[in-house]
Every structure is written in structure tokens, then in C-alpha cells.
Image (cartoon, coloured by chain):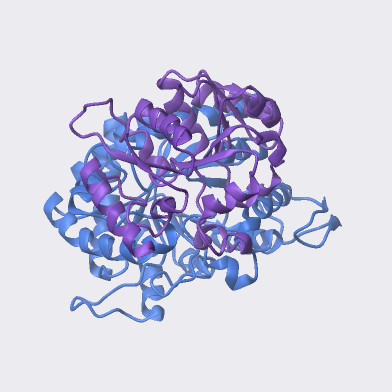
Chain colours: A purple, B blue
Amino acid sequence: MEPGRLAVLGAGHVGPVIARLAIKAGYPVGIATSGDPENLALITELMIPGAQPRWARDAIAEADVVVLAMPLHRFDEIDPSLLNGKLVVDAINYWPATEGVLEAFEYGGSSEIVARRLAGSVVVKALNHIGYHELEGRARPAGAPDRRAAGVAGDDPPAVATIAGLIDGIGYDPVRLGSLRAGRVLEPGGPVFGVVLPLDEFERAARVGSRSLA
Amino acid sequence: MTYTFGLDTFGDRNSAADGQPLSHAQTIRNVAEEGVFAEQAGVDFFGIGEHHTEYFPMPAGDVVLASIAARTEHIRLGSAVTVLSSDDPVRVYQRYATLDAISGGRAEVILGRGSSIESFPLFGYDLADYEELFEEKATLFAELVKGGPVTWAGQTRAPLIGQDVVPHTESGPFPVWIGVGGNPQSVIRAARLGFSLALAIIGGPPSRFAAYSQLFQRALEKFGRPPLPVMVHSPGHVAATDEQAKAEFWPRWRDIITVMAPERGFAIPTGESFDAETGPDGALYVGSPETVAQKIAANLRILGASRFDLKYGMPGLTHEQLMTNIDLYGRKVIPRVRALLA
């Protein structure tokens, strides 16, 4: 199943990068912040050509896949009911040293906590572990010798498959992880976070990392 | 286009030639000497970034800048950066307006966060409030630098009602920049407030920032403001040869990034990543004067920027290595870049 239209929520460091990659891969993309899309007009025109600035509510309603790319402390500003029935990609990290301690995220994997709040959505963790300044530069077409891997973790296999297709489309070899809990290896401090690895090394690092989680 | 060239430091703790760390006090005195020497070498600007760590013991750079101001005549002096979110905008304005007085109108301020997050817990701020703190305080700062009575109310400090904030500057507002690390909304904010744009490029290909520069000029138009300059701030090290510069810089870079990696989310540098960053498409300006000059000239062109600040030094380098870096940057790199861009 192709994911169809994307809504990228967040236009800071990460959102525009994901939006550009998705557009390049052929996906229609709407982008939104918490505010007026008018404020995004210049950013989209110059930095994300082809993306459509929207109110968050409209971007979500139009989309098949919603990418969370806002800072984690802004996550609770979203009304979860807007995301009911949506496939949600959680690209956010919980990173206390850079963003401060958030009590709600102190225990457990951040995407598991996100998924609990978005009970009406299917949540997949992806696109969080490669730095925004590298995500575009390291993307390669399928089969390229220097292609790198990216993780896709979720509890719902068809959703994971869909997002694996998106990851492949934007330029990475997807590595599927069978649960959001297993996706903790993708988090800050984990074995694949911030390092951009080829497929075999990624799988090896993730295996070792998941043993230490068990 | 008129180009200007600066040197920035975070007060990177020096070591002696035998590798023993020097005291914080000696490091601070060395920074003052480096600032004075930068003027003699022909550098246009000397900036000190606010940090609060054992390896960057530089929380009060404005005091050091004042000592440099007293011993120099031409070089412009400023912060690089001031962590405005965890400071009081009125006090920041007053300190730099005082520096402007001492230096005869040579003060500048770069507002931002840089890699300095340690000031938040130190002064009792929550990092989660960063965005709100910066937005509100930067807006107030824009009012303060205009001069004249300020009326302001917000959530982050006491209101001001027709407040005359002293000292008054002699020659109008001093230059204010906003340091941006890659968030396009921060670029829009700089344009909205009428501040110049400082692009902090510390990793990856600098060319990806060209769109930020265009975004800034377009946003200035949209807000009905005249064009304002764009600065590039990047780390580096200049020595006689490429080999020497890399040999001096690499272990110090590796060590400090390794220390900062867990808290800042940086990847641990490898020989391969260092070669990429010091190569023509990377963010680090490490090499001989010719290598560094070529790279600065190329990136100023690509980025439509008229100012380059080299963040020189790294914890563990010696004061003598830094003085050589300053000498080569001022006497060789800057004239060469000017020639390349002429």
C-alpha cells in the first residue's frame, strides 16, 4: 500500500527536511505548524517548493500519513481526536539535555507514550534517528552502493510496511522493528542514534542494542 | 559588497604545551590577549560566546570584551552568542551599551542559544520554555536597542512603562544579529525584528544554508525592511600547512565533541567524518591559509553572505597555537579572501 498524501506537522529543523524528501519521492505534502499557514508561505516557497502550507487541522484531514516533527513539548498541544484513524509517523525525540525534562516522558520509550495519547491512531516510529542536517545528504536511490539504513518500528505490521515503503522511497534501506518498544533502539543514547549506518551494520547494532533492552 | 571578517571564541580552556590544562583565570587572560592581538593582525571583529562549562569557562564575556576595548582602537567587539533566553534583555542591553561607550561605538550583539544549554538550569529556566522566552525577550531587545523610552509587557519579566533605559548610545543602535542553526522560523523572526542573520554552520555542507539567506532577504522585503547583512559562523583552525592544522585540531575536536555528544546528540567524530567536514563540502575551516581562504570565499559567494566569523580554538589547544591561528587568519587568510572576492 502506498501512503498517499503526507501531512508534516512542524516547520523547524526537521519538518522541512522530511517534507522535501517526501516531495522528491513523489508524495503530495501538506505542512503545518500550530499557527496560520500564511506564516509558512515564504518558507514553503523558498525551502520546500511543492509543499502546501495548511492549518494543522486541514493538513491532517487531507492526509493518509501524518508526520510528527514538532518539539516534544509542543506535542500535547495537538488534539488527539484530529488524528483518529490516521497512520502517524513519530519522528520526535525525547532529549532532556537539549529540551528539558518532561515528566510524562521520563519512563518508557517516547513513541510508546505518544501512541498511548493517540489511542485512535496507528503510530510508527521512524525518521528520528538521523540528524536533520544529514537526512538529505545521505539519501540515495535503491541499490546505490553507499545507501544507508533507517529504522521503522511499530506494533502494526501493515503500518510498518507502509512506512518502510516511504523510507525506501526517500532514500534509505528500511529496517523493520516489530514493536514500538523495540524501537527504543532508535532513541537518543541508542546504538543507531546519530550515526548513519549501512544496512548490515545497522541490523547488527540494533540487535545488540535490543538485547541490552530486553 | 563590503566584506568583514571576525574571530569568535567560547573561552575554550587552554592547555600548556605538555597538555596540562591551564587555569580558568589564565585562559580568560589569554582570551584578552588574543582579542588585542586580533586587532594588530587586521581582524575586523572579535566575539566571545557565552558558556558556563569547565571547558568553556566564559560566562561573562562582556567583561573580557571591555578589557579588550580599553586596549584597542578599531576592532569591533561583541558576543557570539549571548544566550538571551536565560538573561534579562534590559541587562544585556545595558552591558553592551556600556561596552559601546567604552569602545567608542564598537559593540555588537549576537543573540541566540548556540550550543549553550547549561545556562537554563543555572539561572532557573526550563529548556522547554526556550521558544517562548526567546521570542518575548528578542522582541523586547528590539525595542531597547532603538533607544528612547520603552513600554513593554510580557510573561518573562516585569513590565516597562515609558522606561528610559541607560546608558544611551552615542551613535544610534549597535548592530544586533540573531544566530540561527537551521530553523527557518528563526530566520523569519530575525527579519521581522529587523536583526541581521548569523548562520551558525557547524556540520554538513554549508551550501544547504543558501536557501536560508534567500529566505531572510525575502522576509525582510515582506516586512518592509531594507536589506540586512548575513554572517557565517563556523569552527576552524589555521596553521602553516593543512597537515599541521589538522594534526593540532583533530584530537581536540574529537575529544570535545565526544564529551558533548551525549548531551547534545552529536555523533562521535571519526577520521572519515573529520575528513568530510574539513573537505571542500564540509563545515570546518581547518588548514593552511590558502585552503581556509578558498573555502571561506566559496561559501560567502554561495550563501550571499558579507561577513565570516571563524570560531577559533578548541579546549586543549595552546595559547601559542591560537596566536599563530590569529596571526595567519588576519595577515594571510583575510587579505586572500578579499582578493578572491574582488
Q: Is residue A138 left or right of residue B175?
A: left
The quadrant the C terminus of chain B occupies is top left
Q: Is residue A133 above or below residue B247?
A: above
Which residue is painted at 43% across and 63% down in the image?
Answer: B263
Q: Position of residue B85 (x, y in %)?
A: 63, 58
Q: Residue at x 41, y 80 (%)?
A: B25
Residue B108 visible to an observer of this rendering: no
* Position of residue A72 in the picture relative to residue B19 (left or right): right
Locate residue A152, reporting x and y percent: 40, 41
Circle count:
0
B23 and A153: which is toward the camera: A153
**Above-or-below relation of B235 to B9:** above
Q: Quadrant of the N terminus of chain B?
A: top left
Q: Residue B117 versus residue A125: which sits nearer the camera?
A: A125
**Horizontal relation, residue B186 to residue B273: left or right:** right
Does residue B317 appear in the picture of this structure?
yes
Q: Is residue B89 above or below residue B283?
A: below
Q: List x then y, in percent, for residue B295.
A: 27, 38
Image x and y of residue B252, in percent? 25, 64
Q: Quadrant of residue A87?
A: top right
